[in-house]
Amino acid sequence: MQKGLFVILIAALAAAIGAQEVQIGGGTLLFTGKVASGVFFDSDDAEKEGETGPINPSYYGSEGKVYLWNESDAKTGLRAELSAKYTNNNIGFRIRLRADNALQGNPNTAIGRYAYGWLNLFDEAVKFTGGFIDLSDNVWGTLGDGDWDIGGNGIRMEFKPFHLKPLQGLDLGELNIGAFLLVPLQSNPNKIHDENMKEISGDVTFSRMLGETAFGFRWTHPWFYVSAQMQMDTSVDGKEILDASRKKVWSGADDEMRFMFGAGFTLLPELLITAEGNFEGLGNWAARGTGDLRQTLRYDFSRIPVADRFALGVKARERLWGYDVKELAGWDIPLKPWIQIKPFVDFRASGEFTVSLEFGYAFGHLALANPYEAQQLVYESSNLHIKPTLTYKLKNGLELKAWYMFNRISYGNLSDRNPIFADRKNSYNLAKKADNHTLVESLAKQQIALEFVWSF
């Protein structure tokens, strides 16, 4: 209850201050804020298995319960944040306080704090940023549907060579390359309470911090953009995963090593083409590796007088696994990709009002939360959803969104696909976690939401 009141207090402070500029010492101090929430109804919010865990991990309560929840902004019951940004020529800093509250019967509050400063040198060709750095900087982020980026506690250095020496008559755009030295907040921030995991301890040394470095670049051009980041990893903030005999399967050195990339075509303003990927567990791909690929194609008919308010597009997503379950649980089950395709259409009724319709179809073989337990292995034969959305944007920064979604998820029986499950039960019952099951009951659900995001 006290944590929930703290979220409300942050929201009240943000609303009271609002967007304001203050001149201090030759620089500008800007205050901004945001509050997001929504009213949500799910016809069946009982926990069921989905892509990488429960289909609805953020939903709480009995079936059909109405509660506060916002899917579009934060997937929380209430999010509030207050930011202050100071800029004075080539120096500046940013401070942000954010609070997220579930408020759906499980009132857990997450407090996020960012505080970092920056320094520009050589006519902004070199930039140093230090502190607890926010992801919203998005210096080398992928900029697509996933919009992945790396943030955290540390020091980041950026170098922009094109900024120094542009070629005459040729627009090279801007190239940004550099490194981000990530510093763990403590000797081991991951406190492990899982019998299949072992906490890794050790002091934070400079050499171990160097092993946490992320390298990145982005080339932004009027015709295209391309970016990539490679995050290294040491055991300083990792964990060891143990098999049934308590032998190490992989260690913290494999825990956070990842590679991100993003690319987009920007030559035509009415055409959007993006592709991006996020690969994790690169230190031991055969036992830890996962990949998330996403693509977007959108065309806005802005140049056609009759259809200038329409936009058509399609999004695609693929989930890949570098490992198989045999590496983890001794079961010879190769994991197939999970694939989703989402065509959509947008109609801009006015400058403020938009109507959207999205169709989604997914299929594939999914490995879920804990591969050591049979009920966490699910074969999803299909996932079909239809989602109309109404969005209204007011001039004062308030965005209202109402949407409805029908979702039909069908599951196949693992015992039909692999003989090792032939002697296991042919049903799924959450009340009997000790049982091993091979079939998850198919699911048809309806969801209705009214959300708001107020930015100021």
Image: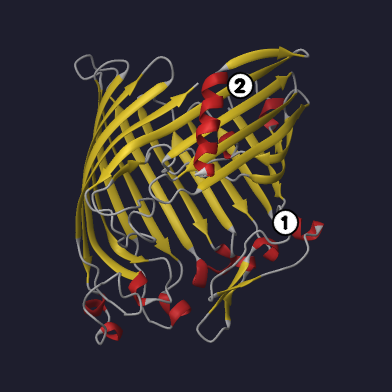
The residue shown at (60%, 35%) is 97
172 over 325 or under it: above or below: above
Q: SS class of the residue under badge 1?
A: loop
Q: Give the numbered dot on residue 74.
A: none
Q: Position of residue 374 (x, y in %)?
A: 35, 77
Q: In this view, does 285 lie to the left or right of 237?
A: left
- Neighbourhood count class around disc 1 (C-alpha, 10 Å): few under 14, some 14–19, many 20 upward: few
Q: Where is residue 349 in the image (x, y as percent from the top left)?
A: 24, 19
Residue ID for mark 1:
186
Amino acid beneath label 2:
Phe
Q: In which quarter of the image is residue 350?
A: top left
Observer-nearest of 106 and 158: 106
Residue ID for mark 2:
31
Amino acid beneath label 1:
Gln
Mark 1–mark 2 Cα distance, whole angstroms, equals 31 Å
Colouring scheme applied when the structure was drawn: secondary structure
Observer-nearest of 280 and 307: 280
The residue shown at (63%, 19%) is 30
Q: Where is residue 100 in the image (x, y as percent from the top left)?
A: 50, 41
Q: Position of residue 306 (x, y in %)?
A: 19, 16
Q: Which of marks 1 and 2 is nearer the N terminus?
A: 2
The residue shown at (46%, 48%) is 107
208 over 437 or under it: above or below: above
Q: Quadrant of residue 82?
A: top right
